[in-house]
Amino acid sequence: MIPFDFDYCKAETIEEAIKAYTEFKESGKAPLYYGGGTEIVTLCRRGQISPGALIDIKSIPECRVLGIEGERAVFGSALSLSEIADSKAFPLLDRTCLGIADRTVRNRLTLGGNVCGRLPYREAILPFLLCEGEALIAEEKSTRWVPLKAIFDKRLKLAPGELLVQMAVPKEALELPYSVARKTKGGRIAYPIVSAAGVKAKGAIRIALSGAFAYPALLGSTSNFEEGVGATGPFVELIEPFARSFISDAWASSDYRRLLTELSVAQIFEELGVRKQ
């Protein structure tokens, strides 16, 4: 139960959602878009946020899309992580979603809620960072596709009132070789100490991380590998620019996180065909 009163709007279209946000904001209501509500409800109960209005986007058709549209594989922001994982449409995303929380939570937690949430993990964005993802953003007068690299800097940079409608990757990304390594303390469904994902494409291996830092991050990519040759260098090259970003908390020290990151990256390289000497 949320311990305060608020206005509620169930939007049926993108236009209704944007209009409601504008009207609530103009009346001083501090509105939020609402998908599954797992994080919003928790933060409201703890007194960490107190929105005056919630705009439910689950009935907006564009936010429920899952499939191929032209050259993109598209995933609506109001899809639950369980729906995405059960679809088996994007193996790397399916695998990543299955590592987040338990089935009961995943049944409500949406793609948009995870990607735009306040928690530092936001693991569902890793496959999109790795695979040249895009975001479909709606605002008052337009809806546009934007490359993630243009709007993601530690978090998705949305202006007030902008709505994340869909996320997408090139359809060929669905077939890329991939690997995932997730390290936790306190059981499989715990928040990750390190969650690493990698893909191999066009002679390069790309690595993205969650949990190690206070934000998800694309480490970068390394190319021109030969099987079993020169594999030590890339491990250091990918991780070293983030050496001062490893966090310490009740779950793990920064040194331990770095160690687990190195082990996770090594595992991914090996599974994708590059062995460390």
Image: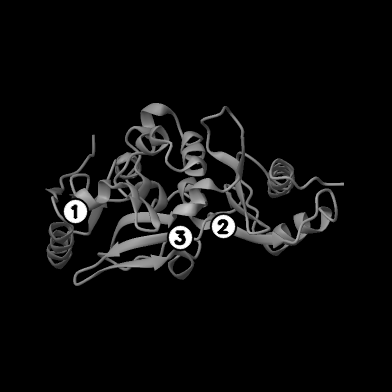
Task: Name the one closer to the observer, 131 or 57.
Answer: 131
| The image quarter in which residue 237 lies | bottom right
Residue beneath disc 1: 52
Name above or below for residue 238 compared with residue 82: below
Amino acid type indicated by mark 1: Gly
Residue beneath disc 2: 217
Task: Name the one closer to the observer, 168 or 260.
Answer: 168
Q: Residue at x 67, y 58 (%)?
A: 204
State left or right for residue 219 relative to residue 35: right
Q: Residue at x 51, y 30 (%)?
A: 189
Residue beneath disc 3: 155
Q: Residue at x 45, y 70 (%)?
A: 150
Amino acid type indicated by mark 2: Ala
Question: Distance from label 3 to label 2 (Cα)?
Answer: 9 Å
Name above or below for residue 235 compared with residue 160: above
Image coordinates for residue 184, horizontal then vertical, percent: 60, 35
Circle 1 packing at 10 Å, graded few (<14), some (14-19), many (20+), is some
Circle 3 packing at 10 Å, graded few (<14), some (14-19), many (20+), is some
Picture quarter with the N terminus: top left
